Amino acid sequence: MKKILVTGATGAMGSPMLQKLLENPAYEVYATSRSPKSDPKIHWLQGDAKDKSFLNEILGCNNFDAVVDYMAYTTEEFRERCDFLLDNCSHYLFTSSARVYAEKDGPIDENAPRILDVCRDETYLSGDTYELAKARQEDILKSSGRKNWTIVRPSLTYNKRRLQFAIFELKEWIYRPLCHNSVIFPAQMRDTVTTMTYGDDVAGVVSKLVLNPDVMGETFNVSGGGHGTWGKVLEIYRPAIEAACKEPMRVREVGAAEEIARHLRRYEQYRYARGIDRIFSNEKVEAVVGHYNYTSMEEGLSNCMRAFLEKPDELRVGARKAAYLDRLVGETTPLSKFPATKQKAVYLLGRYGIIRV
């Protein structure tokens, strides 16, 4: 039996990865979680995988054949751990991101320039935003002097708990139609092309890379299911939303994409990823694992939206973000959506411009 460890195993990509690995009878699957978990098929190791002492303990004692790492590190955190991770498994799979790529016309393959390679904005480069951190961590792996690693660059990944729209994450936009308000659509993004891949499909492809000798020291895009504009994505979501709300979905276009992105502290994501056309080549990974039957965006997004809307009451609405967006389009969110008195006060003060949100 081969012992496979998945770190960050409770996240959007980690959870389906566990299920894909369990399909292989030759694998004994281990996973980390900060909270107690119980599953007779999985060896759960309770602790924070970013804690070096916990990481040292589990890697030093278990002699893993492969580690599939879904943890999010700063560059310095990864630099401190890289050698130890490579020393303590036969195959280390590092989850990077397709966000590392610079803007490029046409399909983007693994040899395309990264933002880190071509950007000349010294102020931006002095930071360690997500796409820069992932690229720098890739470079740390490549300069390690070892080859027992594989870099995976998934495109924008979704599931029933993570359904992105334009610059917004799920909890920042879906509450609006559920409260009978309009969906806010940054007009600059309507015709921008995005590529979205179902999380289970990303896991399915990555599971085929584990312990494959042909992928050592290599980098792979994982992206499939098609691509389309953000306008198309919203139309895919529309039927499930209208069925749940029992009314037509209203859309308000606003010419404030950059302003909204800055307010959400997500400007770099808008500027270098979601606000530009993104189509990726999958040829390299398919040459190794063969053709994979990806879930189409139309099927996957609509099914995941319907699954989420079965329990929409679990959604928590952020008072500050709701106040900002409502003020932007002249709407209001019911105070019942904010359970605490302080949240109600923050919303009202922000919505009517008494405090800055």
Image: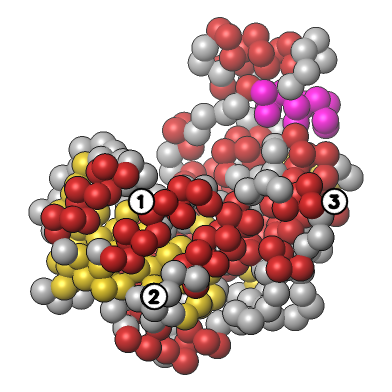
- Left/right placement of residue 103 relative to residue 82 reads right
Residue that appears at 21% across and 42% down: 46
Report if the CB atoms under discs 3 and 1 are less than 8 Å apart: no
Q: Which range is magenta?
A: 320-332
Amino acid at the residue labelled 2: Arg
Q: Position of residue 145 (x, y in %)?
A: 42, 74
Q: Position of residue 177 (x, y in %)?
A: 65, 38
Residues under labels 2 and 3: Cα distance? 47 Å
Is most of the magenta stretch helix, strand or loop?
A: helix
Report if the CB atoms under discs 2 and 3 are less than 8 Å apart: no
Residue that appears at 26% across and 73% down: 90
Q: Position of residue 150 (x, y in %)?
A: 42, 74
Check the image and tell me how it is coloured.
secondary structure
Q: Report the disc number at residue 187.
A: 3
Q: Report the disc number at residue 8.
A: 1
Amino acid at the residue labelled 1: Gly
Residue toward you, 18 or 323: 18
Mark 2 residue element: loop
Residue that appears at 36% across and 44% down: 50
Q: Report the disc number at residue 224.
A: none
**Residue 328 in sight in this render:** yes
Mark 1 residue element: loop
- Left/right placement of residue 45 relative to residue 107 reads left
Question: Which residue is label 2 attached to?
Answer: 146
Residues under labels 2 and 1: Cα distance? 24 Å
Location of the N terminus (image quadrant): bottom left
Mark 3 residue element: helix
